[in-house]
Amino acid sequence: MASNYSSNIQKYKSWMNPWYNQMTLTGGLAILSTTSGYATSTLSYFESATAQVALSGTSVGTTITLAFTRVGNDVTMSWTNFSGTVGSGGSAITSAAAVPARFSPLSTVQTPIVVTGNGSAVATIGQLQVTSAGNLTFYYQNAAVFPSATMGLNYGSASWNTNF
């Protein structure tokens, strides 16, 4: 009896094997709830991706890794920790077309981030701007340029909706 059972399980595992790795749904996934007032929505998009992005504005070219996760219309972008030296006169830290179009916001998004600057290791609040063209700009305090000195960005993330 046990060997017959094992044989049948192996047959089912073999038949279901493609489902273990992925499942394709046409029209999306509807998640139902018994909560009063709940409106069923369909999840029709999920994607994760990474990108190596070159930044300008530092005296030595800096490359960071960006990670993107999109669930429906909501995007979270995370970045690695990095530091560089801002040249004479100061600068914002930028990258053109760093965000792939399918992850970009519909209009410009601005969000606070943690930065270091002015040669200090003390963290302060900076600002990240993401445009609909996928351009990134990292600013120092109060949306100012980083002063001429060592600067850094701490690990961080920002979120936005692709419909706004």
Image (tube, helix red, strand yellow):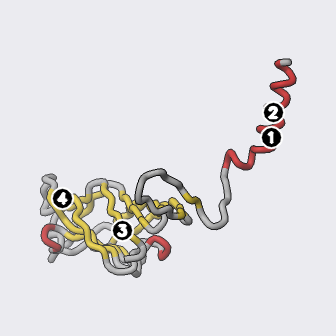
- Mark 2–mark 4 Cα distance, whole angstroms, equals 57 Å
The residue at which mark 2 appears reads as 10
Q: Does label 2 or label 4 sit earlier along the sequence?
A: 2
Assign a secondary structure to mark 1: helix
Assign a secondary structure to mark 4: strand
Crowding at mark 2 (Cα within 10 Å: few <14, some 14-19, many 20+): few
Q: Does label 3 or label 4 sit earlier along the sequence?
A: 4
Q: Quadrant of residue 127?
A: bottom left
The residue at which mark 1 appears reads as 14
2 and 4 marks in contact (CB < 8 Å): no
Crowding at mark 4 (Cα within 10 Å: few <14, some 14-19, many 20+): many
- Mark 3–mark 4 Cα distance, whole angstroms, equals 24 Å
Identify the residue at horizontal 74%, vertical 49% (top origin): 18
Above or below residue 79? Residue 19 is above
Q: Does label 3 or label 2 sit earlier along the sequence?
A: 2
Q: Does label 3 or label 1 sit earlier along the sequence?
A: 1
The residue at which mark 3 appears reads as 160
List x then y, in percent, for residue 160: 36, 68
**Front position in the image: 85 or 100:** 100
Assign a secondary structure to mark 2: helix
- Mark 1–mark 2 Cα distance, whole angstroms, equals 6 Å
List x then y, in percent, for residue 124: 14, 58
Amino acid marked by disc 1:
Ser
Mark identifier at residue 116: 4
Crowding at mark 1 (Cα within 10 Å: few <14, some 14-19, many 20+): few
Amino acid marked by disc 2:
Gln
Q: Does label 1 or label 4 sit earlier along the sequence?
A: 1
Assign a secondary structure to mark 3: strand
1 and 2 marks in contact (CB < 8 Å): yes
List x then y, in percent, for residue 32: 52, 54
Amino acid marked by disc 4:
Thr
Identify the residue at horizontal 41%, vertical 59% (top origin): 37
